[in-house]
Image (spheres, rainbow, N blue to C red):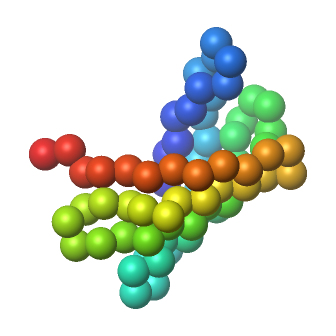
């Protein structure tokens, strides 16, 4: 997986892997600059929505949700 995020005014990038077991998505990825490992989990449903998303690293944590755009 490839991740593009925003930290302050900077765009940051990460790469990693993901698995989908049943309806649970688990991701592990590493940002390049600064080097930070993060993990995320979310629940996937058949409409293409990720809910109950949680991410964390050694500095912080948060929540997210995503919807597929067609």
Q: Residue at x 61, y 41 (%)?
A: 14
**In the image, residue 20 above or below residue 3:** below
Q: How many marks?
A: 0
Quarter holding the C terminus? top left
Q: Quadrant of residue 6?
A: top right
Residue 65 in the image, given as x and y percentages of width and height = 44, 52
Q: Residue at x 20, y 44 (%)?
A: 69
**In the image, residue 38 above or below residue 4:** below
**In the image, residue 31 above or below residue 7:** below
Instruction: Work out which residue is located at the far bottom of the displayed protein and give it.
Output: 22
Q: Residue at x 20, y 66 (%)?
A: 47
In the image, 9: left or right of 60? left
Residue 20 or residue 2, whichever sits in front: 20
Residue 68 in the image, given as x and y percentages of width and height = 25, 51
Residue 63 in the image, given as x and y percentages of width and height = 59, 52
Q: Is residue 35 visible?
A: yes
């Amino acid at each position: 997986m490839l991740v593009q995020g925003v930290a302050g005014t900077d765009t940051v990038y990460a790469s990693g892997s993901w698995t989908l077991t049943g309806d649970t998505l688990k991701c592990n990825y590493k940002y390049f600059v600064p080097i930070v490992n993060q993990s995320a989990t979310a629940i996937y449903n058949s409409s293409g929505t990720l809910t109950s998303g949680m991410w964390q690293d050694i500095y912080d944590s948060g929540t997210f949700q995503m919807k597929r755009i067609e």
